[in-house]
Amino acid sequence: MSLHGNLLGPEPTRLPVDPAAAELAGGTDAKAVAAAHPASMIAWATLAEDALASGEPVTAYAYARTGYHRGLDQLRRNGWKGFGPIPWSHEPNRGFLRALAALLRAAEAIGETDEVERCRTFLADSDPAAPGELGLS
């Protein structure tokens, strides 16, 4: 990087591995994982996705918003300045991106159109490939 910084914009943010992901992959119940790892974005995203699949959009909204805010905290701790790439291709980023997509879907289900548009823009700005990967394109 030069004295004047990266002229193409900020470097992509790559979050560290979330240990809760292995527990979820191993079949541990998402509520138990979220209780044991309340900062885990992937646990909250999983709970939100499950609630959406069960027809519980308000519950999904609460879970997704929790995952989203936990993600913002972690992104900032890892150098994100409120903008810039959050690549889907980096596996640990997927918890945040999934929580953001679940928030979009839950907001859509409860008719919160402003939130839907904010989430849609944020997701596409984070990584143009993410909406397609998450079935939102």
Image (tube, rainbow, N blue to C red):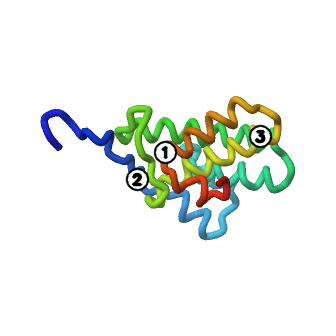
For residue 27, side relative to residue 17 (left or right): right
Tell whether label 3 touches label 1 (CB within 8 Å).
Answer: no
Q: SS class of the residue under badge 1?
A: helix
Please, what is the three-letter code of the amino acid marked with disc 2?
Pro
Q: SS class of the residue under badge 3?
A: helix
Between 137 and 20, which is closer to the camera in this rendering?
137
Sequence-wise, the earlier of marks 1 and 2 is 2
* Residue 53 percent location from the top left of the image: 81, 56
Quarter in which the N terminus is drawn = top left
Q: Is residue 52 above or below residue 68?
A: below
Q: Which residue is mark 1?
A: 126
Which residue is located at x 49 percent, y 45 percent? 126
Please, what is the three-letter code of the amino acid marked with disc 3?
Glu
Q: Which residue is mark 3?
A: 108
Mark-to-mark CA distance, 2 and 3: 30 Å
* Quarter of the figure with residue 66: top right
Which residue is located at x 77 percent, y 40 percent? 108
Q: Which residue is mark 2?
A: 16
Please, what is the three-letter code of the amino acid marked with disc 1?
Ser
Q: SS class of the residue under badge 2?
A: loop
Task: Categorize mark 1 by other alpha carbons within 10 Å: few (<14), some (14-19), many (20+).
Answer: many
* Count of marks, rendered view: 3
Which residue is located at x 56 percent, y 52 percent? 95
* Residue 123 percent location from the top left of the image: 56, 44
- Marks 2, 3: nearer the viewer: 3
* Residue 88 percent location from the top left of the image: 49, 56
